[in-house]
C-alpha cells in the first residue's frame, strides 16, 4: 500500500520514518514508567523485531486508513448499551440469549476505560516500570455471580452464518482471543472478579441482500469465549527482556513486508 505523509491540514510533507515524541520511545533499562498498549503487546507476539524497531528505535510505521464502517457499528452499539446502562436494564441481545440477569456495567471510569488512545484499563506489571493498558469496547455485569463480563464488538461481512466453533477457530480470529485474554488479565489485576465467559458481539453484514437501498443489514450473534490469561505474564516478562536488550531480535520469516523490503533493496 502506498502511504503518503500529510500534516493536520492534509498537505503533503516529507516522511521521516522516525517518531519524534520521546515518551513513545523506550531506552533499554530506563527507570521511568513506560506504557505498552494491548496492540503493541500483540505486535510483540507477532514479530519481536518490528516491536523493537518501533518501541526502542522509534521507527514510524506507515499510516493505515481508519476502519470507519466498523467504527460506526461500535459507536452505534455503544449508544444502545449506554442507554441500557443508564436505565440499568438488559440490552435486547441479552434478552435474546436469555441473559436476563446481565446488564451493562456502570462505573465512573467507563469512558476512560473505553478510550484506547489516551487511557484504557491500566495496570503496572508486577514491580516493573511497564504500565500495561488496553481500551475495552464494553463490560457487562453478571448480577447473579456479581462478576464482570468482558465484551468486544466485531463487525464483518461474510456469506456464512456466524457459529461459535467456526468463529473461534478462524485463523484471523486468534488475535481477537488474545485481546479478551489481555483485558480479563488487566481487570483481574485491577481487583475485579471476571466471569470465565467473555463475548464477541459479532455484527455480520448481509452480503446476500437483494439490493442496497442505502441500508446495510447485519445479523448479530453473541459468540461466547472462555478466556485464559495463564500465558500472559510469561510473555510480558519476555517482552520486557526484549525492551531491555541492546540487541535487535530476529524477524518473523512469514512476514510479507520484510520479504518485500528485502527484494526491493535488491532492485535498487
Ligand atoms: S518481519 Fe515484518 S513485522 Fe517483523 S520486522 Fe520485518 S516487517 Fe516488521
Image (cartoon, rainbow, N blue to C red):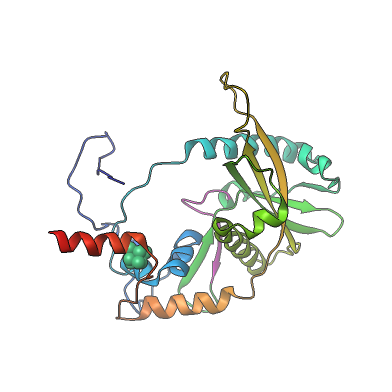
Identify the magenta region. 114-124
User: Is 121 included in the stretch rendered in magenta?
Assistant: yes
Residue in the foreground of this view, choosing between 189 and 261: 261
| Left/right of residue 76 with respect to residue 41 in the rendered view | right
Magenta: predominant secondary structure element?
A: loop
**Residue 85: percent from left, percent from top:** 73, 41
Q: In this picture, is 225 found above or below 82?
A: below
Residue at 69 percent across and 43 percent down: it is 161
Please identify the residue farthest to the left as the structure is shown: 268
Q: In this picture, is 138 found above or below 68?
A: below
**Residue 97: percent from left, percent from top:** 82, 45
Residue at 83 percent across and 41 percent down: it is 95
Q: In this picture, is 253 found above or below 205?
A: below
Say if residue 98 shows up in the picture. yes
| Left/right of residue 192 with respect to residue 250 in the rendered view | right
**Residue 264: percent from left, percent from top:** 20, 59
Q: In this picture, is 263 found above or below 9?
A: below
Quadrant of the rendering where the C terminus is positioned: bottom left
Residue 11 placement: quadrant? top left
**Residue 208: percent from left, percent from top:** 62, 31
| Left/right of residue 9 with respect to residue 109 in the rendered view | left
User: Is 69 included in the stretch rendered in magenta?
Assistant: no
| Left/right of residue 55 with respect to residue 221 in the rendered view | left
Please identify the residue farthest to the top as the structure is shown: 213
Say if residue 25 shows up in the picture. no
Residue at 78 percent across and 37 percent down: it is 92
Amino acid at each position: 500500500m502506498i502511504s503518503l505523509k500529510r500534516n493536520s491540514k492534509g498537505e503533503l510533507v516529507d516522511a521521516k520514518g522516525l517518531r519524534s515524541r520521546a515518551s513513545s520511545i523506550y531506552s533499554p533499562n530506563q527507570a521511568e514508567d513506560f506504557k505498552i498498549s494491548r496492540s503493541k503487546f500483540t505486535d510483540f507476539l507477532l514479530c519481536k523485531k518490528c516491536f523493537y524497531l518501533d518501541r526502542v528505535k522509534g521507527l514510524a510505521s506507515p499510516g493505515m486508513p481508519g476502519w470507519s464502517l466498523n467504527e460506526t457499528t461500535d459507536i452505534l452499539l455503544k449508544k444502545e448499551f449506554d442507554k441500557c446502562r443508564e436505565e440499568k436494564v438488559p440490552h435486547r441481545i441479552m434478552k435474546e440469549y436469555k441473559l436476563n440477569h446481565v446488564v451493562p456495567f456502570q462505573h465512573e471510569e467507563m469512558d476512560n476505560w473505553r478510550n484506547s488512545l489516551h487511557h484504557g484499563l491500566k495496570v503496572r506489571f508486577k514491580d516493573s516500570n511497564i504500565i500495561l493498558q488496553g481500551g475495552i469496547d464494553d463490560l457487562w455485569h453478571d448480577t447473579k455471580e456479581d462478576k464482570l463480563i468482558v465484551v468486544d464488538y466485531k463487525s464483518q461481512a461474510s456469506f456464512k452464518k456466524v457459529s461459535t466453533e467456526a468463529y473461534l477457530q478462524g485463523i484471523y480470529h486468534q488475535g481477537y482471543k488474545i485481546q479478551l485474554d489481555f483485558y480479563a488479565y488487566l481487570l483481574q489485576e485491577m481487583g475485579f472478579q471476571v466471569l470465565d465467559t467473555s463475548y464477541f458481539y459479532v455484527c455480520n453484514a448481509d452480503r446476500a441482500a437483494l439490493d442496497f437501498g442505502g441500508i446495510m443489514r447485519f445479523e448479530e450473534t453473541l459468540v461466547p469465549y472462555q478466556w485464559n490469561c495463564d500465558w500472559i505474564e510469561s510473555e510480558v516478562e519476555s517482552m520486557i527482556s526484549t525492551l531491555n536488550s541492546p540487541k535487535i531480535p530476529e524477524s518473523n520469516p512469514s512476514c510479507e513486508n520484510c520479504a518485500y523490503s528485502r527484494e526491493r533493496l535488491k532492485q535498487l
